[in-house]
Amino acid sequence: MKQFDNMSDEELALLYIKGNNSAFDELLTRNQSKLFTYILYMVKDQDVANDIFQDTFVKVITKLHEGKYTDSGRFSYWITRIAHNVIMDWYRIQKNEHIVEPTEDNDLSNLKGASVTDTNRENEIINEQILTDVKHMMNCLPASQREVVYMRFYQDLSFKEIADITGVSINTSLGRMRYAILNMRRMAKDHNIILKYEM
């Protein structure tokens, strides 16, 4: 809505708390795509992702009405953390708290990778294969490592932001990234995958 164009998410949240329901509709419109992509990436099931997305926004509404949000300039991180907690609850229910097993459709093809700008078709094909290999290796990582890789490289979040969202220390976030990289290097070595990206 045009009346909200110049307002930040934080301002919209505070406006909604004061009773403006249209402000919440605008918040939902602005954040739903990015948040749903994150949820779907983590659970790998469209129906489950829809349920978690709805549960997340029910919790967002509840917390807003309970006064548990203050304007910190980080609304998108705040709702991502709520989504993270809902996902972790779902994992606990599924008894898959520590690892997500890869399945045939457990890939990252729905994510947008770096665009390949090289005009040399051979390099373009090689780069596409490397990105595909990286995505497949990411799918084999434990959920906590996969999540930090996704947040760092696909959402461009800092390790402090990742730590805040996932409720762990910065050192834990860095440790998960370190183990993710070590695991991916090991997988690349085990499968003779050469990860040299041509620019």
Image (cartoon, helix red, strand yellow):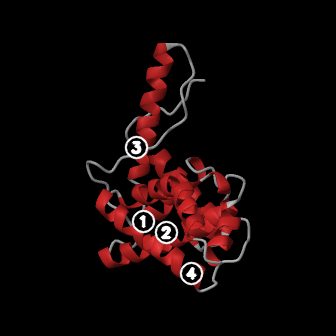
* Residue pointed to by mark 3: 110
Circle 1: is it few (<14), some (14-19), or many (20+) Cα within 10 Å?
A: many
User: Mark 4 touching mark 3, by CB under 8 A?
Assistant: no
Marks 2 and 3, how far apart at CA: 19 Å
What element does badge 1 sit on? helix
Marks 1 and 4, how far apart at CA: 15 Å
* Residue 100, quarter of the rendered image: bottom left
Task: Pick whichever, 192 or 35, lies toward us.
Answer: 35
* Residue pointed to by mark 4: 63
Where is residue 27? Give x, y as percent. Answer: 57, 62
Where is residue 57? Give x, y as percent. Answer: 48, 70
Q: N-terminal of the two: label 4 or label 3?
A: 4
Residue 83 tag number: 2
What element does badge 4 sit on? helix
* Residue pointed to by mark 1: 53
- Side of 19 where 120 appears, left or right: left
